[in-house]
Structures are given as C-alpha cells and as structure tokens.
Image (spheres, helix red, strand yellow):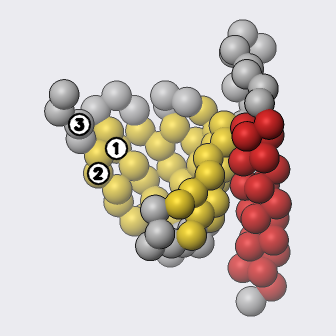
Amino acid sequence: MIRFRRRVKILPGVQLTLGMRSAGISVGPRGLHVGYNTHHGAYASAGLPGSGLYGLTYLDRGEGARVTHSAAGAFVTTFVITVMVVLIIGYVAK
C-alpha cells in the first residue's frame, strides 16, 4: 500500500495536513495539538516530543458513531485532555 502525507506550516503552531484520502488542520505547540480532518473529524493529541509516545482521542464523533469503552481508552482520553488543558494554559500564559 502506498501512503502519502504532506504537512505545511501555515503559521507558528498551525499546520495543514494533506493526504491521499483526507485533509486536515491542527493547532497547538509541539507535543500537544487539537485539530480537525475530513476523515475522522475533531481530535486532540498529546505526547512526549521525540519519544514516539503519544495519546490521541477523537472528539464528538456524532450521533451514528460507534463508541467503545475500555479502561485504557478512558485513561488515554483523560490523560490527553488533562495534558492539553495544562499545556494550553501554560502556552497562553507566556
């Protein structure tokens, strides 16, 4: 399978992502961002830059979406949202 993804920096902290099946935009500092793409919708992500470790959660998938629940999924969602709030507050306070 051939995959294609191209990221374009629009402004500091704002990226446009173009792929073969979707396009999206994300906002946030390195290691933490929220965004929207045409394939999955709104999402939030937090990670440790350079480590390859990150958490990703999709936000408001709509009425017809299938939702699965697990302890690990709940932990990742809580972790991502908590880290996002803390880092965004710190980023804005600068």
Q: Is residue 57 left or right of residue 20?
A: right
Residue at 40% in and 32% down: 22
- Element marked by disc 3: loop
Mark 1 or mark 2: name the one nearer the start of the chain. 2
65 and 16: which is toward the camera = 65
Q: Pointer 1 and pointer 3: residues touching (CB < 8 Å)?
A: no
For disc 1, the marked residue is 18
Distance in Å between CA atoms under marks 1 and 2: 5 Å
- Element marked by disc 1: strand
Distance in Å between CA atoms under marks 1 and 3: 11 Å
Mark 1 or mark 3: name the one nearer the start of the chain. 3
Q: Please identify the residue farthest to the bottom as the structure is shown.
A: 94
Residue 2 vertical position relative to residue 13 in the rendered view, above or below = above
Q: Amino acid at mark 3?
A: Arg
Residue at 73% in and 40% down: 72
34 and 67: which is toward the camera = 67
- Element marked by disc 2: strand
Q: Amino acid at mark 1?
A: Leu
| Marker disc for residue 6 | 2
For disc 3, the marked residue is 3
Q: Pointer 1 and pointer 2: residues touching (CB < 8 Å)?
A: yes
